[in-house]
Amino acid sequence: MSPLGCWGLPAALLALLCCPGTGEKALKVYIWPEQVAVERGGSQEINCSTNCLQPETGGLETTLKKTLLGEQAQWKQYLVSNVSQDVVMYCYFTCSTQQLTSMVSVRVFHPPEHVLLKLQPAWVTVGKPFTIECRAPAVAPLEKLTLTLLRGKETLHTQTFGNATAVPQEAMATHNITARREDSRHNFSCQAELDLRSLGKSIIRKVSAPQELQIYEPMQDNQMVIIITVVSVLLFLFVTSILLCFVFGQQWHQRRRGAYGVQAAWRNLRRTYRAQPA
């Protein structure tokens, strides 16, 4: 298959531009894709074309490593690789000594590889506040990122970010909420979305591991009164039984001592009687 057959859109565009018509056509250079986003260290195919019928020279000007994949008189296809930072590339052609150029900006993106969720505190009383915190380290471009805090499938909070530098940054979203009794039946999670559709890519999604909130529900006042009463009664019975055991033990000990005293007196009396002379 001809290399031109792989580039139906640029070929069709060139055919339209090169069709005969009234007046002189303005000479132009085209670069495709018009928006470029590459993951750090990745590669991208770039196509340069012109409506000049017989350009003298042409090519791609860039500081990146480039490989020529194919060419014809009005187009050249390159592979740029090892993209590590945001750069600007230029397609150029020379037609009748006239220099024609077109540029495209290459954005390097860092997808969210880790999404971390934390509940503070992880154990909370019904009706008390707690905080949901979500972090996504080393993400770029940050203005394309959205963090969504979820309770089950319910969206609790959505956080977007303004313009930021090209350097990967940590994104964080926090949300304060009041604990409910039914929260113990739902998992909390955080979803990170890097929307690169405006740069010719798709949406990259990453979800945190689910976290469960431990709910402590205080007892009602009447239940507490009942529990205190039962405990008090049981304590009273325990103390009473100890006292009764002590009293009965003392009485039994005294009876035993009294019996032993009578027996000893009787034996002494018998010894005295036997000792008297006949």
Image (cartoon, rainbow, N blue to C red):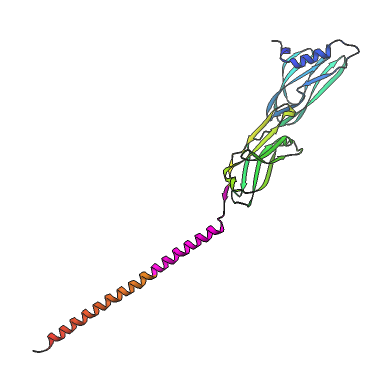
* Residue 272 left/right relative to 55: left
What are the residue bounds of the magenta stretch? 214-242
Residue 99 versus residue 249: which sits nearer the camera? 249
Q: Residue furthest bottom?
A: 277
Q: Is residue 55 visible?
A: no
Q: Is residue 182 visible?
A: yes
Mainly helix, strand or loop, the magenta region? Answer: helix
* Residue 154 left/right relative to 164: left
List x then y, in percent, for residue 100: 85, 19
Q: Quadrant of residue 87?
A: top right
Quadrant showing the N terminus: top right
219 in magenta: yes
List x then y, in percent, for residue 215: 57, 49
Q: How many marks?
A: 0
* Residue 267 left/right relative to 209: left
Q: Residue furthest right?
A: 23
Residue shown at 59% from the left, 48% from the top? 181
List x then y, in percent, for residue 175: 68, 45
